[in-house]
Amino acid sequence: MVNGKKLIYGLFILIGIIFYNCLSIAMEKPYHHLPDGTFRNPEGSPKRDPNVKWSYKIFNQEKKKLDMTVPNEHVVEKEKVLEDLKKYQEDDYVAWIGHATFLIKLGETTIITDPVFSKNAGPLIFGPKRFTEPALTLKEIPKIDLFLLTHNHYDHQDMSTIRRFPYKNAKVLLPLKLGKYFRRYNDVNEMDWYEEIRINKDLKITFLPAVHWSKRSLTDTNKSLWGNFLIDYNGKKILFACDTGIGNIYKVIGNKYGPIDLIFINIGAYNFYPIMPQKDKSIYHTNPEEALSIARDLKSKKVIGMHWGTFVLSLEPIMEPPKRFKDNAEKYGFKKEDAIIFKIGEINSLKKLLGYN
């Protein structure tokens, strides 16, 4: 009888140990998940200097000094945009609407990225105003099957566009904690880093880390995630970057997922001097040279520079990013023609860009 009791006690202890270990494993969270429910950048990423204080007064004073002349060749005329949209409708293509908004057609799937069609990047009528119009209106865009949102900043998550978006049956992929903004949509999928979703037999999307942050109000800093989308289509890999700064994570991603055939990456919004102590340096937005460096780390074959030429978000000259991007391409191992700059409204064949049939 005594031995029987000991056996029962032993079993209870063993079950307790197993339960405790299982619970501990379940409670372990990845590095980017903090105990308070917020998120942080990948391990080893640069950190913001807490002593640097933002000044709207200085920013607006310096902004007035910028030459806001937009060259004619920066924007494609609407008539040609509509003609080209019709011309490429049976092809795989890329079209730049402006800023981080692209149309990417892959087979039967048309993707839109970070759609912003409002006149300003901010709540209601506030925030930076566009100095170039979207290449198309919401009524003019083709049927969208897949909606990719990288993070919640106003120049990427535009609530007016989200409310007015005509294709609410599109599958929406977005970071953790942002699904609440898409209640009127029928297929909303929050993603954590390294999660994969297969769209169809030819198309798979993986959500990957970026070096950035999230905020839409005074009380929600880093309460939603941010990240990059890796688009795997018929053996071709396209990475659409969230806003990002440099970080060791890109060598990790390059080793695991590279080589990448084509990267879309931010090349604007990097100069906040004299508010920030260093000129041409932002830990959350790559300058053109840093963007090329990340593309090299990702073992990319070609790279498209985006996130410029639409809003004044920083203090570099508005047409400086593409020039620096092209001028420095060869220093980072790219041919000049493989560091690609679109005009707003330009549409190009992906098959021609990437060399597939």
Image (tube, grey):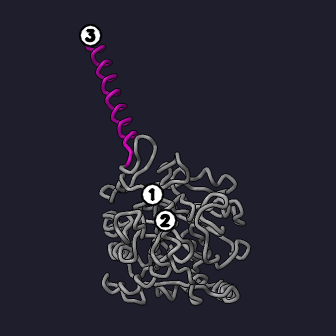
Dividing the picture into quadrants, the one containing residue 334 is bottom left
| Residue that carries the numbered disc 3 in the rendered image | 2
> How far apart are the two marked residues, 2 and 3, measured between alpha carbons?
80 Å
Location of the N terminus by quadrant is top left
Callout in the foreground (2, 3) = 2
- Is residue 107 visible to us here? no
For the point 49% across and 55% down, the residue is 214
Q: Main secondary structure of the magenta part?
A: helix
Is 10 in the magenta?
A: yes
> How far apart are the two marked residues, 1 and 2, measured between alpha carbons?
8 Å
Q: Position of residue 46 (x, y in %)?
A: 33, 59
Query: In the image, is residue 347 above or below residue 142?
Result: below
The three-letter code of the residue at mark 3 reads: Val
Q: Which mark is residue 59?
A: 2
The three-letter code of the residue at mark 2 reads: Phe
For the point 45% across and 81% down, the residue is 320
Q: Which of these two is toward me, 189 or 61?
A: 61
For the point 49% across and 86% down, the residue is 353
Q: Which of these two is toward me, 18 or 37?
A: 37
Q: Earlier in the sequence, mark 2 or mark 3?
A: 3
Q: Position of residue 65 (x, y in %)?
A: 50, 75
Query: In the image, is residue 5 above or below residue 341?
Result: above
Query: In the image, is residue 152 above or below residue 93?
Result: above
> In terms of secondary structure, where does tag 1 sit?
loop
The three-letter code of the residue at mark 1 reads: Trp
Stretch of the chain drawn in magenta = 1-30
For the point 47% across and 60% down, the residue is 196
**Callout 1 environment at 10 Å: few (<14), some (14 to 19), or many (20+)?**
few
> How far apart are the two marked residues, 3 and 1, measured between alpha carbons?
73 Å
Q: Which mark is residue 54?
A: 1
